Amino acid sequence: MEDQSTEFSKPKMKKIAYLRVSTAEQRPDRQIDGLKMMCDEIHIETLSAVSRRRPVYDQVLALLGPGDTLVVWDLDKAFRSVVDALVEGEKLRKRGVHFLIANLRIDTSTPGGIFVYTIMSALAEFERRTLSQRTKEGLAAARRRGAKIGRPSKLTQTQLQDAQRRLRADRKALGKIATECGVAPWTLTRALRRWQLTY
């Protein structure tokens, strides 16, 4: 008897490219031409590298499913930093989505690509921890030298002394005193606490 069963075809895995440009005048034609040869779709977003929200990028992520691949031409054409790219790449990996950096030929769907990606992740983590440690050591050294760390006070010592004297006479005058000093009441209260701890 002839086998009547049918084999269901697997859905085609998509390769979707994302490219960021800072201004509408930028012409990333070379990158677009390169991405056209390897991708099913290309999505271009126009915004600054420091922008917190990336609506086009979010739309691209929504289109990607397990087995699909997010393709970027270069890290700085898609992400704010290498660390940002690595964090995003790890999120994709957990969803079963592959990540391809075209000009570096790093493809996380291959064992070699995963290896290089892992090395990059380790180096980025090491750099981040080293920078954090150096920052802490620098702040500690500055404090030992008597340097004041943080934003400069918005109020002078004379203003704080006057505010303290007036508040002792009338606690309800906080809002009025703050307005005269050009700050919010909570700013004045916080500045007084710090000043009292210092002097």
Image (cartoon, rainbow, N blue to C red):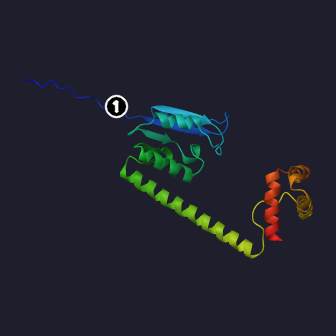
Work out whether 135 lies above or below 64: below
Report the residue at 57% width, 34% height from top: 56
Quadrant in the picture for residue 157: bottom right
Residue for badge 1: 11
Name the spot of residue 18 as percent of width and height, x first.
53, 38
Quadrant in the picture for residue 2: top left
Q: Nearer the viewer, residue 161 or 104?
A: 161
Name the spot of residue 115 as percent of width and height, x first.
41, 56
Report the residue at 45% width, 54% height from top: 117
Q: How many marks?
A: 1
Quadrant in the picture for residue 138: bottom right
- Give the amino acid at mark 1: Pro
Residue furthest bottom as drawn: 144
Report the residue at 63% width, 43% height from top: 52
Quadrant holding the N terminus: top left
Q: Nearer the viewer, residue 182 or 84?
A: 182
User: Would residue 38 be seen by someone viewing this image from the given angle?
Assistant: no
**SS at circle 1:** loop
Residue furthest left as drawn: 1
Left or right: 139 as drawn, with respect to 124: right
Report the residue at 38% width, 46% height from top: 109
